[in-house]
Image (cartoon, coloured by chain):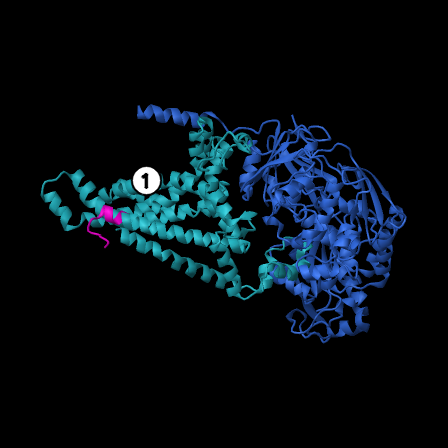
Chain colours: A cyan, B blue
Amino acid sequence: MLVFIARRLLLLPVVFIGVTVALQLLMQLLTPYQRAAAYVQSEQQMNRLDEIIRLYRLDDPWYLQYGRWLNQVLHGNLGYSRMSRQPVMQTIADRFPATLELALFAIVPVIGVGIWLGTAAALNRDRFIDQVTRVMSIIGWSLPTFVLGIWLLVIFYGWLGWLQPGRVSVRYLTELAGNPEFRHYTRMLTVDALLNGRWDIFVDAVKHLILPVITLSVVQSAQIMRVMRSSLLDALGQDYVRTAKAKGLPQRVVTRKHARRNALIPVITLAGFVLIGLINGVVITETIFNFPGLGQWAAQAATNLDYAAVLGFAVFTAIMVVLANLLVDVLYGIVDPRIRYA
Amino acid sequence: MKRSILAVIAGALLAVAAAQVPADTYVYMTFGEPVTLDPARAYDTGSGGILENIYETLYTYDGESIDVLVPSLAVDHQVSPDGLTHTFKLREGVKFHSGNTMSCKDVEYSFQYGALVAHPEGAIAYLMGHYWLGTSIDGSDPAAFQAEVTWEMIDSIVECPDGPDGLTVQLNLVNPTPALLAILAYPGFSIIDSQWAIEGGSWDGTEATWTEWIGRDLTQEFLHRNPSGTGAYQLVEWTEDSVVARAFPDYWGGEPAIKNVVYQYVDEQSTRILALQQGDADRITINETSALVQLEGAPGVKIHRNPNWTSTSVTAVFFNYDIDTTNNEDVGSGQLDGNGIPANFFADVNVRRAFAHLFDQEAFVQEIYEGDGVVLTMPMPPSFLGYNDDVAVRTLDLEAAEEYFRAAFGGELWEKGFQFTALYNEGNTIRRTALEIIAENLEFINPKFRMNVRGLQWADYLSRTAERKAPMFALGWAADYADPSNFINTFLDNDGYYSPRTAIDLPEIQELIDQADTIQDPAERAFLYREIGTLTFDQVPLLTVPMQGVFLVTRDNLQGVYYNPMYSDEFLWKDISKN
C-alpha cells in the first residue's frame, strides 16, 4: 500500500511539468501585445504597451519565460497575482480556507443526500418515490447554478431577510479586522470562532454558509443520486445478492451490506471528482454569494490573463487532483477488499 | 433530545434578521479592487477611492467644486514670476498614522520617490515628468531612463530651505505649468510618511540606491499594502474581498462622524442591489441606468441626481488625419476611387464637417441616455475652465452634409464615392451606437458612400489604432486633473496623447494650445480655451459624443453625499454621516 502511495506521489512532478508547460504554450497563442493589453485598464495607459511588454519581458521566447517562472517556483515562490494584488502563495493561503470550509460543509449533504435518495429510488424501482427522485435529479442537474442561487438569494435574503451573502456580517467584519484578540488558527471562520469561544460569530458564519451549501447540494447531489441508483440496481441483480437472499438473510442486511457496499465503487469515483470540484472552488456559487474562495479568483485571473495566477492555480489543482485520486484509490481498497495494490 | 437541539440551532439562526449597518459604519459595495495602495503606482479608480481617504495632497478640492483648490497639507503657495519655483508652507503639527510628524522631508521623499520610480503603469512620469525633469520617459527601461535623468535632477525637484524638519517646501520645475496645483491634487502626489517607508524597506531616500528603484514593480514592495498617510482614515485590513478602514484619532482636521468604513467587492450586481435594499450596504455601484428601475421608489433607497452633475469623462469619435493604408483592410483600396479612402481623407475639413452633420447629439441624449445627458460644444467637460457654452453645435442636417461632401476633394469625392470601416472596442455599446448612427445617416447622402462599423477586442483595438490603421474610431478620456489642458492637449495637440493615433495637426488650434500652455493667468487661459471652442465648430477636429448624466445610489439615511468627479468615489468618507 505504501509503495503504491509513494508511486502515485512520484507522479506529481510529471503532472506539474506537463500541466504548466501546456498552459505556457497555450498563452503563447496570444501575441505579446495582446498579453500586454490585459494590463491596460484605461485609455490613460494605452500608449504604454511597448513599455509594459519590456517591463514584464512579455516578448521573450516561451522557454525563457517558463524558465524564469520555474526558477521562482523552485525558490518557493509562485509569483505575483495581478488580480489579487498579492503573491500567488498568499492568495491561495488566504482563499483556500474559505473554499475548504464551504467544501466541507457541502460535501456531507451532497454525498449523503445523493446516496440516500439514490438508494431509496433503487429499492423502490418504478414506484412513486423513484419517479419523484428521478424528476428531482433531472431538475437539480439541469437547473443552472446562477438561477438557483439568485432565486435562493431573492427569497431568503430579499424577501425574508433571514440569510445573507458574503462570509460574515459587517459588524463582525469590522470587529475582526485587525483585532489581535481573535486568533486565526485555521482561517476557516466557523472553526476559528469555536476555538475562540465566539458562539455568536460561529452562528453568523454558519448562516452565511447555508445558501451556498443548499445551492451546491441541489446541483451536485443530483448526479450522485443517479449513479447510486443505477449502480445499486445493477448490484441488486447480481448472483451474490440472490445467494444472500436465499441464505435467508434479512432484506436490510442484504441491501446494506452486500448490494450497497459494492454499488458504492462508482459513487466513490464520482464523489472524488465532486470533492475536487468543490475544493478547487465553485466559480458561480462563490460569485453569486460573494464568497471569497479560490474559484472566484481563478475565474478573474483567467479572464484577465493573470499569468502567474493561472499557472499557480493549475499547479494547485494538479496537486489536488493527484491527492484526491489517491484518496479514492485507497477508499476502493477499504470498500472492496478484492481491489488490492501491490 | 436530538430534535430539541436542532430546534434551538434553527431558532438561533433565524431569530436574528439581517442586521443593518451600524450608524458609525459606512459600507460601500462596489467592484474593482484597488490595484495598489502605493501612490507612486496607483492609476485606477479602485486604488484612488481608498488612497484619497488615507493619504492627502498639498492642495485639494473644495467639496463639489473642481476649479477651486483649497489648502490641505500646504497652507500657502507662492510662485516665482517665471513659474518655475513654487514655495509651499506646510501645515503645522500634522501627524501620520504611524505617529510621525509631517515635514518638508516627507514631501521631498514622496515626490522624488514617484519621479525616480516613474512606473509605466503609474501616473507620475506622465503627469509631472515633463515639468520637473524635462522628460516624460518612464522607468520601464532603467538604462534609457538613466541616460536622460540624473540623480542631480531627481535631487533638485524638492528642496527644504528650512531644513528637512522645517515646514517650507520649494518645488523646482524645469518647464512651467499653470495647472500645477490641480496636478498635485491627484492622489499620485500624496504625501508619504518617509520614515515609515524607509523603515519598512522602501527606497532609503539616498543617491546610493536610487537606480535600483527605477521602474521597480512596486506591487511587491512595502508601501503596496502598508500605507501611512495623514488622511482622516487609516487602513485596518485589505483582504481578498474587502477593505476596512478606521477613523484616525489624531487627524488634524478633527475626527469624522463615520468611524468604520468597509468596502466590499461584490462582482454580482443583483447581490449588490439586494444588499442595498436590505440595508446591508449604504452605497452600491450600479453599472447601467436600466438597473435603476428596480430601485426607483424602493423604501430606504435614495437615488441622487442633479442636472449640474456632469462626469469628467469625454467620449469622442476620432478622425485619423494620416491613415497607414498599407495592407489595411479598413480603407479598402486606399485610394480615392470609390472602393476605399486615401490616407489624407479626413485631412479635408469639408469631409469632417460633413460627418459632423450626420450625428445628432441632442437625439443621442434623448434616445440613448433616456434624456439624462449633456450635449458638448467642445471636447472637454463643461465644468472645466474655458469651456465655451456659446459655440453652436452641428446637428443632423443631411443637406448641409451633402453640400460639404460635394465641396470635398474638389468635387472628386462626390463623383467617385468612398468606403471605409470605423472601429470601436467590443463591449462598449455607447461607442458602437455612435458610429452606427453616423453610418446609417451616411446611406441617405449618396449611394456611392459607405461606412462599415466593426468591433475589435481591446488588445487588437489598441494596437490597430496605435499603428494608425483605424481611419475613424471611438475612444474616450477620463480626467486626471481638473484643467482644460488635460483634455485639449490630450485630444487636439499635434504632440498630445492621442496624436500617435490621429496624426492631428490643425495649425490654428495648435497655436492657441501652445499659447495657453505658457501663461499662468486663469482669465487669459479661459479666453484662449474659449477660442479653441470656437475653432472646434469650424474645424471639427473630432466628433464629441454627449456626456451621460450622473447618479449615485445610497441608503436614504446617508447624509452629506456630494459629487466631485475628480474623486474616484465622488465624495470623501470624512464628509458623510448617518442619522
Residue B136: x and y in percent read 74, 57
Q: Is residue B344 visible?
A: yes
**Pointer 1: residues within 10 angstroms few (<14), some, or many (20+)?**
some
Tell me if residue B103 is in the magenta stretch: no
Q: Residue furthest front?
A: B208
Say which chain tag 1 marks: A
Q: Quadrant of the N terminus of chain B?
A: top left
Tell me what residue is drawn at x 76 percent, y 72 percent.
Answer: B413
Residue A118: x and y in percent read 28, 43
Above or below, A94 relative to B517: above
The residue type indicated by label 1 comes to Val
Q: Nearer the viewer, residue B443 or B418?
A: B418
What residue is disc 1 on? A113
Above or below, B51 relative to B123: above
Above or below, B141 relative to A236: below
Q: Quadrant of the C terminus of chain B?
A: top right
Residue B408 position by quadrant:
bottom right
Q: Is residue B365 visible?
A: no
**Is label 1 in a helix, a strand or a loop?**
helix
The stretch of residues the image draws in magenta is A331-342
